[in-house]
Amino acid sequence: MKVVRTEGALRDALTPHRRADHSIGFVPTMGALHEGHLSLLRAARLECDVVVVSIFVNPLQFGPREDLAAYPRSEERDLHLAEGAGTDIVFAPTTEEMYPAGTSTMVTAADVALPLEGEARPGHFDGVATVVAKLFNQVQPHKAYFGQKDAQQVAVIQAMVRDLSIPVEVVVCPTVREPDGLAMSSRNAYLSSEERERATVLWRALEAGHAALSEGAAQEVAEKVMEDVVESETGVVLGYARAVDPTTFGPSDGTSPILLVIAARVGSTRLIDNLPVSEA
Ligand code: AMP
């Protein structure tokens, strides 16, 4: 496994593979790797000749009052885990390498970025779209792997790839969960042991919303069921609990599939989760 830190070194590492017409699979991450990230790397390993992972905590996608400075960083451990999952190349640039002085071009994310996470985190998806567009240009992957865990991010990337004709196939992999249902997230490391137990409320709410829909409840009723579950837990503040159309993130018209999405603050840690529902 090669670790490269500059665009030039990345290009050099990829040149022989491009010449050999190898398929390139790419997994963008912010590090602090866990089983969710590793599932993406394993999927890429199965489907592609070369697997590239990026580890970059992207300042552009953090708001001024968010956790950029505190975001967990564990490069040595990450490299070990990435290698174990079959990674060939790790791209771990510095902020200066990614955004040299004078950099100012940004991608404006599609309208799907506006509600929910976009409302809670102004500018977040523009920052995500910008770094992912840049990484796509640097790596030029055939396939790029993203987690269903960040469903609105997936919709933003899919819209960007479509709208800007970026030649990459976006592959979406299922959310990896802890045995008690909590979606794996680098931010789970912020939770105290008490908060860690309370955090299962997101999954419990999604399951309750799903059960309500399965029993024929209207979407608004399922939303209320999810809200009630979250509000019954102490120390947890609801952000939103909605049933949405998974491509627009607006209300589902009942004919398209439904995605249940939820955000809540557990202590001072903001967590998100979602559950696709097949029954309309
Ligand atoms: P991050 O490092 O949080 O930016 O995440 C990098 C990629 O890993 C994104 O595509 C995430 O959606 C994905 N990811 C994060 N957590 C999970 C999870 N629990 N299951 C599956 N994919 C995940």
Image (tube, rainbow, N blue to C red):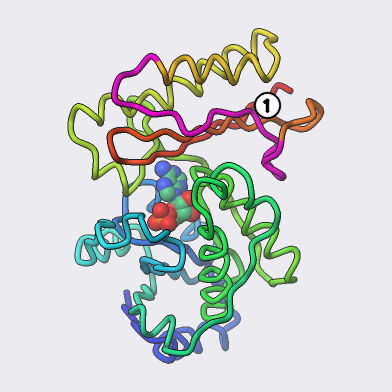
- Is 55 drawn above or below residue 234 in the view shown? below
Q: Nearer the viewer, residue 11 or 276?
A: 276
Q: Position of residue 136 (x, y in %)?
A: 56, 73
Helix, strand or loop for disc 1: loop
Q: Residue at x 36, y 84 (%)?
A: 96
Say left or right for 105 vs 219. left
User: Does the segment drawn in magenta span residue 239?
Assistant: yes
User: Does the segment drawn in magenta span residue 90?
Assistant: no
Say left or right for 274 vs 57. right
Say left or right for 6 vs 113. left
- Which residues are the magenta region? 232-250
What amino acid type is highlighted by mark number 1?
Ser
- Is 189 drawn above or below residue 75 in the view shown? above
Beta carbon of the mark 1 residue lies under 8 A of ligand 1: no
Q: Position of residue 47 (x, y in %)?
A: 55, 59
The residue pinned by badge 1 equals 278
Task: Please indicate, yes or no, whether residue 86 appears anywhere in the rendered image.
Answer: yes
